[in-house]
Image (cartoon, rainbow, N blue to C red):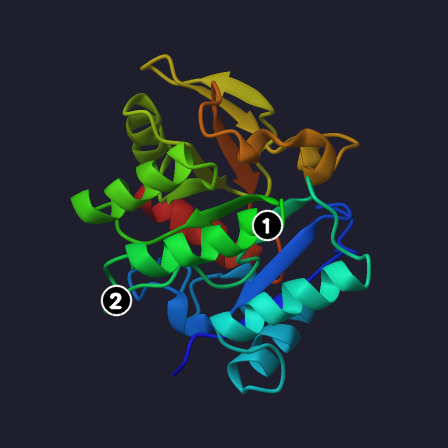
Amino acid sequence: MVTRYQLTPVSSNRKTGPIATIRVSSNTCPSTCPFNNGGGCYAAGGPEALHWRKLDKGETGGDWIHLHDQFRAAREANKLKPGTLLRYATAGDLPTIDGRILNAEQVNRLRGIFQSFGLKPFTYTHHQQTYSNLAVVREQCEQGFTINLSCDTEAQASEMFQRGYASVVVVPADDTRTAWHDSHGTRFVTCPAITGDTTCEKCKLCTKADRSCVVAFRAHGAKRKKVGERLASVA
């Protein structure tokens, strides 16, 4: 399956605010992701799933060359201005070579497209945190494309944060914490767009590769109960 991309120049999502977003076909998702195959992935249910399936079927979007054309058309229509935040992969993940190893060349190519249009890209990856994958993540962060590591537990998120990586973690939907420190001194902050009256466009916390905290997201979507059960099993 060819990896497909669909650009939304101005998101209507209340949480993100009017930033640019890209949805990526599901073949980019790691088989090792615990939210895969009925594990509670928010993008596999609800309205997002309808758009995602259309992308997978080839009814929307196109390959990375077509993605460049989407950006150009959006700019010509004055729908994409320099300095705009770009959330890559509202559904999907980064491209790989074999489903496991991040494709450094392709990720570089994507960053080149984003930055050539003056955008400020950020994303999250749930691919395994191997030496080669982490090298790609670190390089991209240094070049201005912030890639957040999606971690499976608070302990893992704390460890990766201590190692210098921008890290995020999912917590149960009924978790009422807004900010806390773990036993290692790592600070956790629940996504401000969840706990307060703000948006990704205004907050920008996840766009900062050198931030001072792990960002926690409360499980959301139709499968949030399933996510809570999985989190309880690994606690």
Quadrant location, the N terminus: bottom left
Q: Residues within 10 Å of mark 2 (few under 14, many from 20)?
A: few
- Bin the neighbour count of mark 1 within 10 Å (Cα to Cα): few under 14, some 14-19, many 20 and up: many
Q: Residue 97's mark?
A: 2
Give percent across and percent down for residue 67.
56, 69
Residue 225, relative to residue 134: is it above or below? below
- Numbered circle sitting on residue 87: 1
The residues tagged by marks 1 and 2 sit, at their Cα atoms, a distance apart of 22 Å
Residue at 45 percent across and 72 percent down: it is 26
- One can see residue 160 in this view: yes
Mark with earlier residue (1, 2)? 1
Mark 1, secondary structure of its residue: strand
Left or right side of 47 for 176: left
Tell me the residue at 29%/59% (across/down): 103
In front of the other: 99 or 36 = 99
Instruction: Tell me, for residue 102, which label it has, or none.
Output: none
Establish if 54 lies above or below 205.
Answer: below
Q: Amino acid at mark 1?
A: Arg
Q: Is residue 46 above or below residue 130?
A: below
Left or right position of 227 against 161: right
How far from the left and from the top, in percent, is residue 233?
Answer: 34, 48
Give percent across and percent down for residue 7: 64, 65
Residue at the image position 33 percent from the left and 25 percent from the top: 164
